[in-house]
Image (cartoon, helix red, strand yellow):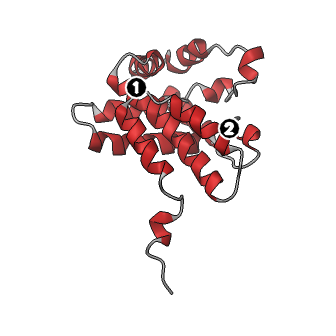
Amino acid sequence: MKEIADLLFEAKMLKEIPRAGFAFLGAGRESVAEHSFAAAFIAYVMTKLETGVDGLRLITMCLLHDLPEARIGDLNYVQKKYVTADENRAIADTTEKLPFGGDVSGLLAEFNAQETEAARLAHDADQLAFILDLKSISDVGGQTPEKWLPVVQKRLKTELGRKIADAVSRRRWDAWWMDAYSE
């Protein structure tokens, strides 16, 4: 159980690691764990809208997709020009002593390869989590998201991902409660 406790502490570390891209936006902040929760929740929603996809696999990929960042941090696109993180080694070191390590490393490899429908949906859930953040910042007056939203939307790989992004772009971040607001 020592390895299980270590894994849990490692995953908990994601709560302390900030997402690096927000520095370029000049607004907003989020931990890697907060981002992973958002991606996993989006994946859950996707499983209800997309038939024929293994929902547990999709949600688990989103839950795990940034686990290596507990060891390598969250590098933004500028940092990646100068720093090469060994994500495969981080994954191997994380999973080597776990009784289910092969499952974890297999899901991360599938996510990174983007060859299955579940992996492409997980990728889109990851991007949609960022799109939600960008739209929210834009809706409260931030201007830098306007540059980034089209870039991130172009990363989407599935029709479902594009449909969700379109719906997000047509709603204000606070419409879910303001539309029914009354005093």
- Give percent across and percent down for residue 138: 64, 52
Occupied quadrant, residue 149: top right
Is there any visible trace of residue 61 in the rendered image? Answer: no
Measure how far apart labels 2 and 1 are at the Cα level: 25 Å
Residue sitting farthest toward the bottom: 183
Is there any visible trace of residue 94 in the rendered image? Answer: yes
Amino acid bearing label 2: Ile
Residue 111's place in the image compared with 56, above or below, is above
Q: Residues within 10 Å of mark 1 (few under 14, many from 20)?
A: many
Q: Residues within 10 Å of mark 2 (few under 14, many from 20)?
A: some
Amino acid bearing label 1: Arg
Q: Who is closer to the viewer here, 53 or 105?
A: 53
Q: Who is closer to the viewer here, 122 or 155?
A: 155
Residue 38's place in the image compared with 54, above or below, is below
Question: What residue sits right under mark 1 in the picture?
Answer: 120
Q: Residue at x 38, y 16 (%)?
A: 115
Q: Who is closer to the viewer here, 163 or 105?
A: 163
Q: Is residue 137 left or right of residue 170?
A: right
Does label 2 or label 1 sit earlier along the sequence? 2
Using the image, tell me which numbered label, if any, was put on residue 17: 2
How many numbered discs? 2
Q: Residue at x 67, y 23 (%)?
A: 72
Q: Residue at x 55, y 21 (%)?
A: 94
- Dot 2 falls on a residue whose secondary structure is loop
- Dot 1 falls on a residue whose secondary structure is helix
Instruction: Mark 2 vs mark 1: give the one in front.
Output: 1
Using the image, tell me which numbered label, if any, was put on residue 162: none
Q: Who is closer to the viewer here, 139 or 52?
A: 139
Residue sitting farthest toward the left: 52
- Give percent across and percent down for residue 66: 55, 30
- Give percent across and percent down for residue 125: 45, 37
Mark 2 near mark 1, Cβ–Cβ under 8 Å?
no
